[in-house]
Image: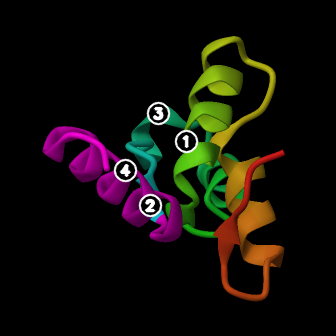
Amino acid sequence: MGRADERVVAAVRKVAESHPLLAVTALTREECVDEEDYEQLTEFSRGFRTVPAGLHDVHANQSIGNLGFEEYAAWAHGDPEGIYRSF
């Protein structure tokens, strides 16, 4: 049997893997060119749930401009449980 702190980390890891996190955009209407732009960027909501492993995908791809928040929101919207499930 492992040390107590190893068991706690394993327990936390197991719980974290099974519970989706909430991702929310801070985008405001004022940051968009017009109302149509804002509607397009928030079409599937200003937030979505993601599995913990998906958080890295979202952050990494937004950081390099590869994918936008709205694309992840659309993928989550298409999931039966409304969750983005990573690549």
Q: Residue furthest bottom?
A: 80
Q: Residue 35's mark?
A: none
The residue beneath circle 4 is 10
Residue at the spot 77% in from the left edge and 49% down from the top edge:
71
Contact, mark 1 vs mark 3 (Cβ under 8 Å):
no
Contact, mark 1 vs mark 4 (Cβ under 8 Å):
no
For discs 3 and 2, the disc positioned in front in the rendered view? 2
- Magenta span: chief secondary structure: helix
The residue beneath circle 3 is 31
Contact, mark 2 vs mark 4 (Cβ under 8 Å):
yes
Q: Residue 14's mark?
A: 2
Separation of marks 1 and 3 at Cα, in angstroms: 24 Å
Residue at the spot 58% in from the left edge and 59% down from the top edge:
51
Separation of marks 2 and 4 at Cα, in angstroms: 6 Å
Instruction: Judge the density around disc 2: few (<14), some (14-19), many (≥20) Cα neighbours within 10 Å.
Output: few
For discs 1 and 4, the disc positioned in front in the rendered view? 4
Q: Residue 55's mark?
A: 1
**Left or right for 3, reference 46:** left
Identify the element where label 4 is drawn.
helix
Residues 47 and 22: in front is 22
Separation of marks 2 and 1 at Cα, in angstroms: 16 Å
Q: Is residue 67 above or below residue 18?
A: above
Residue 30 image offset from top left, x and y in percent: 41, 39
Q: Which residues are magenta?
A: 1-20
**Left or right for 15, reference 82:** left
Q: Residue furthest top?
A: 64
Contact, mark 3 vs mark 2 (Cβ under 8 Å):
no
Separation of marks 3 and 4 at Cα, in angstroms: 42 Å
Separation of marks 1 and 4 at Cα, in angstroms: 19 Å
Identify the element where label 3 is drawn.
helix
Residues 21 and 27: in front is 21
Residue at the spot 78% in from the left edge and 31% down from the top edge:
67
